[in-house]
Amino acid sequence: MQALWLENNQLQLRTDIPTPEPAPGEALIRVLRAGICNTDLELIKGYYPYTGIIGHEFVGVVEQGADHLINQRVVGEINAACGYCRWEHINFVRTKELNRL
């Protein structure tokens, strides 16, 4: 698969990245569009010594996973949630509604 790879503050387009195998309960997403945000730009400048694929904001289609998800459009969500607090639940529901395609 292709990916923008960051290593030693240098970006390169790599075509040799292996396609990940989703674990049970996960899905494989074919990325249609990916965004580069300010966090990615700061990583390129050396904000944090990161090596790997950048572009965590994306839209794609489920290629592997639960049957009811196959061919569904999805977006990437970088915010991790504890799943317990009231405010987090309210914000998650709002975000989910806003992110529907």
Image: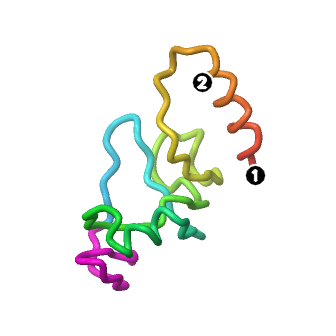
Residue 30 at least partly seen? yes
- Magenta range is 1-18
The amino acid type of the residue labelled 2 equals Glu
Identify which residue, 7 or 66, lies in the foreground: 7
Pick whichever of labels 2 and 1 is earlier in the sequence. 2
Identify which residue, 25 or 77, lies in the foreground: 77
Residue beneath disc 2: 88
Identify which residue, 40 or 18, lies in the foreground: 40
How far apart marks 2 and 1 lie (CA) works out to 22 Å
Q: Is residue 83 left or right of residue 91?
A: left
Residue 1 at least partly seen? no
Residue at 53% x, 66% y is 38
Q: Position of residue 96 (x, y in %)?
A: 69, 37
Do residues under tags 2 and 1 come within 8 Å of each other at their CB atoms? no
Residue at 57% x, 61% y is 58
- In the drawing, what numbered circle is on residue 101? 1
The amino acid type of the residue labelled 1 equals Leu
Other residues around mark 2 within 10 Å, as few (<14) / some (14–19) / many (≥20) = some
Q: Is residue 34 above or below residue 8?
A: above
Residue at 38% x, 75% y is 45
Q: Secondary structure at mark 2?
A: helix
Q: Is residue 12 left or right of residue 60?
A: left
Q: In the rendered structure, does residue 7 fall within the stretch colored magenta?
A: yes
- In the picture, residue 85 is in which quadrant? top right
In which quadrant of the rendered image does the N terminus lie?
bottom left
